[in-house]
Image: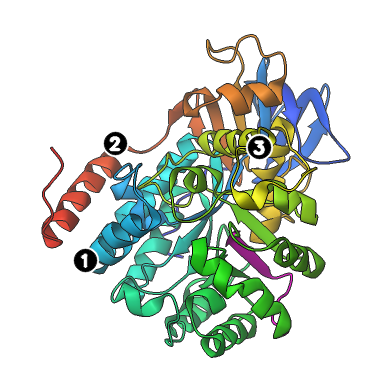
């Protein structure tokens, strides 16, 4: 792949860290992790290796990198535009208003900016929900950015943001056929650091006939599927999950995003078919019009969800904020102040350790890559992060999981490794400044093209 970032796969021995492995057999322990040839070779106490560079992990937490199972990376240069926007305002301003003006270079720099913020905050894998497939060149630019940044990416090929209204909410347009070219020529290898999935609209955003045709196309190409469902009142009316179950199309190769207004019965259908779910806890709390996070209802249905940022135009692009917002909404559930769908008595609850699981191994399962990442398991690729527990905001770290979830931020992420490649060390990301200058220039171009005043 001509755009692939050159790898620096050192032999590393991280010593004396508090290991939060997300591996049920290994559990949590104070110990060491040996990395070689991009993989985790061994995990345990008192490891030694004369050929490895030693990193002192004493007083730090070492865990698998966070996995964001749903982010619209193309919007990386538009971050923090509308934290008080409703869902309709977001669609109007970004997808409909700005999306049609994106050139491939804007997609490239937006994806790079999103990737670098992700890596800096400990996100080592992103599932890029790319509904900016305005042309083959737009998709190629997005994919190239993932290779360049060094992140692990699942590129979810979506629909264009030109004529955005004609591609959603009852659309009779079939998924862009360029996905065949990408599958056959650009991302044919499902074991690579950047892989391909299909971001489909499903029966909530397209007609049932188009939905079935798109799903069959994805399965013909051997691709996992993601789908936005349970979007506000429209989602409650359409009951897309029920439609898929009744048509025999619901299966374990699907990840459903949001599910805010999906019924409890629909969530049980997902569990029965082995499907996975991505909760965008911060976005769903911040943005009126979608509904509320379904986390507790999902647990009641037997589903452990993954977590996601969604769009940086509304919320911060780090997993710490997502975990905190998801937990905050649960506390409203417990206080009886939640939305109407979350008032059933006896809903199961979750804590900080669960949130770290949602953000790591459950994310890997949702993306279909848990055979290679998501836990500190020997044999898996070395995607890991080290979080400082001796910073002012983390001392004293009485409960490590609670400390990370309640008080952690990107500045505490000391080390980031993806497939054995060290991308951040001693708290410093090994790329960045020029990218963010280009992102500002991209934003200015887009605002000018859309006839919008530039920010002061």
**Which residue matches tag 2?**
433
Q: Residues within 10 Å of mark 1 (few under 14, many from 20)?
A: some
Mark 3 element type: loop
**Which residue matches tag 1?**
101
**Which is nearer the eye, 142 or 257?**
257
> Which residue does the image show at 44% across and 55% down from the upper left?
289
Q: Can residue 304 be seen in this view?
A: no
Magenta-drawn stretch contains 177: no
* Structural distance between the alpha carbons of marks 2 and 3: 46 Å
Instruction: Give the mark, 1 or 2, whose residue is nearer the N terminus.
Output: 1
> Which residue does the image show at 69% across and 35% down from the upper left?
334
Instruction: Give the mark, 3 or 1, whose residue is nearer the N terminus.
Output: 1
240 shown above or below 91: below
Q: Do the residues labelled 1 and 2 touch (CB within 8 Å)?
A: no
User: Which segment is the magenta one?
Assistant: 248-258
**Which is nearer the eye, 356 or 279?**
279
* Structural distance between the alpha carbons of marks 3 and 1: 44 Å
Instruction: Give the mark, 2 or 3, whose residue is nearer the N terminus.
Output: 3
**Which residue matches tag 3?**
336
> Which residue does the image show at 72% across and 78% down from the upper left?
245
Report which quarter residue 368 is drawn in: bottom right
Magenta-drawn stretch contains 256: yes
436 shown above or below 19: below
Position of residue 389 measured from the top left corner of the image (x, y, whole percent): 62, 16
Q: Can residue 407 be seen in this view?
A: yes
Position of residue 201 measured from the top left corner of the image (x, y, whole percent): 51, 74
Mark 2 element type: helix
């Amino acid at each position: 792949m001509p755009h692939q970032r050159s790898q620096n796969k050192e032999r590393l021995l991280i010593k004396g860290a508090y290991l939060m492995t997300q591996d049920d057999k290994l559990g949590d322990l104070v110990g060491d992790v040996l990395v070689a040839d991009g993989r985790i070779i061994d995990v345990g106490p008192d490891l030694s290796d004369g050929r490895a560079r030693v990193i002192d992990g004493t007083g730090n937490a070492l865990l698998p990198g966070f996995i964001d199972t749903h982010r619209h990376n193309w919007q990386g240069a538009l971050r923090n535009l509308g934290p008080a926007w409703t869902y309709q305002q977001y669609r109007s301003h970004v997808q409909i208003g700005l999306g049609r003006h994106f050139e491939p270079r804007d997609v490239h720099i937006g994806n790079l900016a999103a990737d670098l913020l992700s890596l800096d905050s400990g996100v080592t894998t992103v599932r890029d929900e790319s509904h900016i497939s305005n042309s083959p060149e737009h998709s190629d630019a997005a994919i190239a950015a993932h290779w360049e940044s060094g992140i692990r990416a699942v590129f979810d090929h979506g629909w264009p943001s030109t004529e955005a209204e004609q591609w959603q909410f009852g659309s009779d347009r079939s998924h862009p056929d360029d996905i065949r070219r990408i599958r056959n020529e650009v991302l044919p290898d499902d074991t690579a650091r950047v892989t391909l999935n299909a971001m489909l609209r499903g029966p909530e955003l397209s007609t049932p006939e188009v939905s079935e045709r798109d799903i069959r196309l994805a399965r013909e190409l051997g691709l996992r599927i993601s789908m936005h469902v349970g979007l506000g009142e429209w989602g409650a009316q359409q009951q897309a999950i029920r439609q898929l179950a009744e048509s025999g199309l619901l299966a374990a190769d699907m990840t459903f995003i949001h599910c805010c207004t999906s019924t409890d019965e629909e969530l049980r259908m997902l569990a029965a078919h082995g499907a996975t779910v991505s909760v965008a806890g911060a976005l769903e709390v911040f943005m009126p019009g979608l509904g509320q996070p379904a986390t507790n209802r999902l647990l009641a249905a037997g589903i452990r969800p993954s977590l996601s940022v969604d769009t940086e135009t509304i919320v911060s692009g780090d997993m710490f904020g997502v975990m905190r917002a998801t937990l905050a909404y649960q506390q409203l559930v417990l206080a009886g102040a939640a939305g109407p769908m979350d008032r059933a008595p006896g809903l199961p609850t979750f804590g900080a350790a669960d949130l770290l699981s949602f953000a790591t191994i459950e994310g890997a399962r949702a993306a279909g890559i848990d055979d290679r990442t998501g836990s500190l398991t020997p044999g898996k690729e070395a995607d890991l992060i080290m979080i400082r527990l001796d910073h002012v905001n983390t001392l004293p770290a009485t409960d490590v999981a609670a400390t990370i979830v309640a008080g952690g931020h990107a500045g505490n992420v000391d080390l980031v490794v993806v497939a054995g490649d060290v991308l951040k060390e001693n708290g410093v990301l090994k790329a960045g400044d020029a990218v963010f200058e280009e992102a500002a220039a991209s934003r200015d171009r887009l605002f000018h093209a859309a006839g919008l005043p530039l920010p002061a």
